[in-house]
Image (cartoon, rainbow, N blue to C red):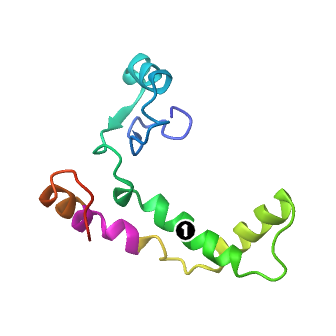
Amino acid sequence: MSIVHSDGLGQFQHDNTTPHASRVATKWLQEHCSDFRHFHWPPKSPEMSIIEDIRDALLHDVEKRSPPPLTPMDLLTALQDSWCEYPPGYLRTPVESMPRRFASLLRARGDPARY
């Protein structure tokens, strides 16, 4: 975190899925909590993570490729090529959707939400 956000403004976030909320991960976060800010996601709320949407879009694009990637290097190249095909403002839409996602989650009181 100190390398990526040397200004101290970075935030660590995860979706509290079972592996991310394990005793080992929880202990590590507690031991390092003074090193960065930790954004507390509601438990198991993947709908709050724009990473899921971006990953799904990339995987969908890669699955459409012919021939499909056969090696890890082919997969990396296919992912990079797909990423480069997105328009420059591609991330703006999911980022701008966050207030709506938060409002839906608050209305659902942390349960799965439609947005």
Give coordinates of residue 53: x percent, y percent.
47, 67
Residue at point 44%, 37% (across, down)? 18
Count of numbered badges drawn on the protein:
1
Relative height, residue 5 to residue 28 (above, below):
below
80 displayed left or right of 114: right
Q: Is the magenta stretch mostly helix, strand or loop?
A: helix
Q: Tell me residue 41's x, y (percent).
A: 31, 44
Q: In the structure shown, which secondary structural element does the residue marked by tag 1 occupy? A: helix
Give the image location of residue 74, x and y in percent: 84, 65
Q: Measuring 86% from the left and 66% from the top, which residue is drawn there?
A: 70
Q: Residue at x 54, y 41 (%)?
A: 4
Question: In front here: 110 or 78?
Answer: 110
In the image, which residues are magenta? 93-101
Left or right, residue 80 beside residue 106: right
Q: Is residue 39 left or right of residue 50?
A: left
Residue 94 lies in magenta, yes or no?
yes
Viewport quadrant of the C terminus: bottom left
- In magenta stretch: residue 43: no
Give the percent coordinates (x, y) of residue 61: 65, 77
Read off the residue under disc 1: 56
